[in-house]
Image (tube, rainbow, N blue to C red):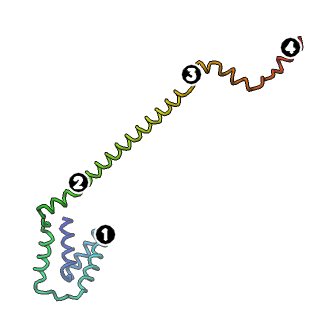
Amino acid sequence: MNEEKNQTWQQIVWRRRRSPEEDKNLQDLRRADPSLDLEIAQDERLTGLISSIRNVPVSSNFTARVMHEARRSATPLVVRTGWSDLHRRWIARLSFAALALFLGIFSFQQYQSTRRHELARNIAAISEAAALPPIEWLQDFEIIRNMGNPPVIDDELIALMQSK
């Protein structure tokens, strides 16, 4: 029922000037539902503004031109076929695959190069260790190392020996 009243007053406001009886019914509707008052006032102002716009002459084939443009914009784009279309469709995919392949090969070569450098460093370290003297020569290393240092004087030991 309420929806029918809304449609009724919208048709009254939009389509034509109101008769005194319709004006009274609209005022009753406004009093009955205050939430519609603002909406009705806005519709009345909008209708007044629209009706104040002067009529512009329209060409005789205006409707035909509008319908033609609507149909034209609704039609799908023409799909091209042939080698050129195949080339355009697959070029992006092929270029991406080539890039991925190039990056894979490059990273694998970098990995191999890094491994080879590590192996070369390890071999160099082993060869340097092989050039060191044998372990038997290093048995008396502590004694030889301390030969250049003067002995440390132990004051407590000297004091203890002198007290006896």
**Residue 125, horizontal then vertical, whole percent:** 50, 32
Q: Which residue is mark 2?
A: 94
Alpha carbons under labels 2 and 3: distance apart: 62 Å
**Residue 120, horizontal then vertical, whole percent:** 45, 36
**Residue 100, horizontal then vertical, whole percent:** 29, 49
Q: Earlier in the sequence, mark 4 or mark 1?
A: 1
Secondary structure under the numbered disc 3 in the rendered image:
loop
Q: Is residue 85 above or below residue 42?
A: above
Q: Which residue is mark 4?
A: 161
Q: Earlier in the sequence, mark 2 or mark 3?
A: 2
Alpha carbons under labels 3 and 1: distance apart: 109 Å
- Looking at this view, name the residue that lies furthest to the right: 163
Alpha carbons under labels 4 and 3: distance apart: 43 Å
Secondary structure under the numbered disc 4 in the rendered image:
helix
Secondary structure under the numbered disc 2 in the rendered image:
helix
Secondary structure under the numbered disc 1 in the rendered image:
loop
Left or right relative to 44: residue 60: left
Q: Amino acid at mark 3?
A: Pro
Q: Residues within 10 Å of mark 1 (few under 14, many from 20)?
A: few
Q: Quadrant of the C terminus?
A: top right
Q: Which residue is mark 1?
A: 34
Q: Earlier in the sequence, mark 4 or mark 3?
A: 3
The quarter of the displayed image where residue 93 is located? bottom left
Q: Earlier in the sequence, mark 2 or mark 4?
A: 2
**Residue 8, horizontal then vertical, whole percent:** 18, 72
Q: Amino acid at mark 4?
A: Met
Q: Is residue 131 above or below residue 17?
A: above
Q: Are marks 2 and 4 in contact (CB under 8 Å)?
A: no
Q: Residues within 10 Å of mark 3 (few under 14, many from 20)?
A: few
Q: Amino acid at mark 1?
A: Pro
